Amino acid sequence: MPEAKPLYPIAGKRVWVAGHRGLVGSAVVRRLQYEDCEILIAPRQQIDLRQSDQVSNWIRDARPQAVVVAAARVGGIHANDTRPAEFLYDNLMIEANIIEAARQSRVEKLIFLGSSCIYPRLAPQPIPESALLTGPLEPTNEWYAIAKIAGIKLCQAYRKQYGCDYISAMPTNLYGPGDNFDVMQGHVIPALMSKIHRAKESGAETVEVWGSGRALREFLYVDDAADGIVHILKHYSDAEHVNLGTGDEITIRDLAKLMTEVIGFKGKLVFDTSKPDGTPRKVMEVERLRSMGWQAGTSLRTGLEQTYRWYVNHHLAEQRAIA
Ligand code: GDP
């Protein structure tokens, strides 16, 4: 289907991708290279996004017309659960600093990125955008979720009070090249990829999977997410946030099995039920995004194969070079 005429054409615009080194930010930079826009990135060594004066000076000097807020403190279930202060404070500061500095510098369009964990633990499934703030959050990631809900509300407040065209998109669980493959801090896909790959290499017979394996999750390949983000940036202008996902779900057990096939590990999976499952089910309703003419194109198997290739050829190669 040919793309409809955008509400916000980004051709010729200066677009700042905040968080360009992260999983999503780096994919957004890759995706924007196909648009006729100028991509701005802030050198990390020079700018701490938690410091408001540094952020406002950067925006004033760089003069972006559009901003993608992909910068965040992120991590998997263990990281979220054990570093609550960092997940709350860092994310609140990063988003508040960027949004306020964008207003001061008259940024025309801003897209704030959150996560599907903003929804109540026992939200209706698939989760519609309207489920926000209808019930208690999942305790293992409520700190991150509260910060991300505050980001949505900042965009809405700035739209209401100042007329800023600031919008929010909530991607589901993302994975892909550039992820954090640390087994303790990472999300399930990169953590299991590291564990299963190591088990294959060392000839181990088992791999430990956290939780019961029955939790259900939805996964979106990060280059699809970046494509969706650019689509929403160009085609959406309203107060309510937009879910960004596939609408498909899989149990952690089936995910782990699929990963053993992709990686070529012949041993067994062992489930450690002393570790948390987190929210029992988390799949988003994606009708709003579909009605804007967008849907994800990469199957989970293909996305996992591409991620595994990147993990072996780039991540491990880089680690060997450092060692
Ligand atoms: P969540 O979606 O916020 O719960 O984030 P995660 O991606 O960290 O975890 C998703 C699910 O995968 C949870 O039910 C975890 O218990 C489960 N899981 C299984 N093995 C692992 C692992 O090695 N690392 C992580 N992070 N999660 C795992």
Image: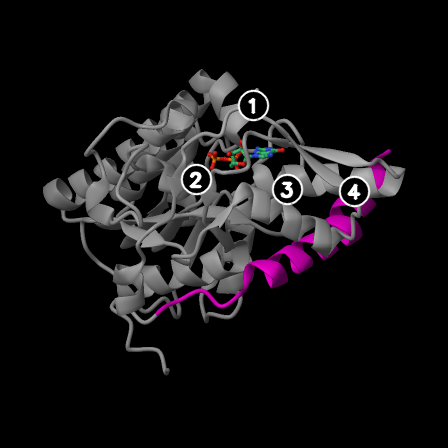
Disc 4 or disc 1, which is closer to the eye? 4
Residue 166 location, x and y as percent?
A: 25, 49
Give the distance between the C-alpha atoms of the residues marked 4 and 3, in whole angstroms.
Answer: 19 Å
The amino acid marked with disc number 1 is Lys
State which tag comes first along the sequence, 4 or 1.
4
The dominant secondary structure in magenta is: helix
Disc 2 or disc 4, which is closer to the eye? 4
- Asked if disc 4 and disc 1 are in contact, CB closer than 8 Å, the reply is no
Q: Which residue is mark 3?
A: 190
Residue 128 lies within the magenta run: no
Mark 1 closeness class: few <14, some 14–19, many ≥20 residues within 10 Å: few
Disc 4 or disc 3, which is closer to the eye? 4
Q: Which residue is mark 1?
A: 275
Number of marks in the image?
4
**Quick check: 304 left or right of 40?**
right
Give the distance between the C-alpha atoms of the residues marked 2 and 4, in whole angstroms.
Answer: 51 Å
Q: Is residue 274 above or below residue 226?
A: above
Disc 1 or disc 2, which is closer to the eye? 1
Q: Which residue is mark 2?
A: 58
Q: Residue at x 22, y 30 (%)?
A: 135
Q: Which residue is mark 4?
A: 267
Residue 34 location, x and y as percent?
A: 51, 70
The secondary element bearing badge 3 is classed as helix
The amino acid marked with disc number 4 is Gly
Q: Is mark 1 within 8 Å of ligand 1?
A: yes
Q: Residue at x 30, y 37 (%)?
A: 119
State which tag comes first along the sequence, 1 or 3.
3
Identify the image quadrant of the N terminus: bottom left
The secondary element bearing badge 2 is classed as helix
The secondary element bearing badge 4 is classed as loop
Which residue range is magenta in the image?
Answer: 294-323
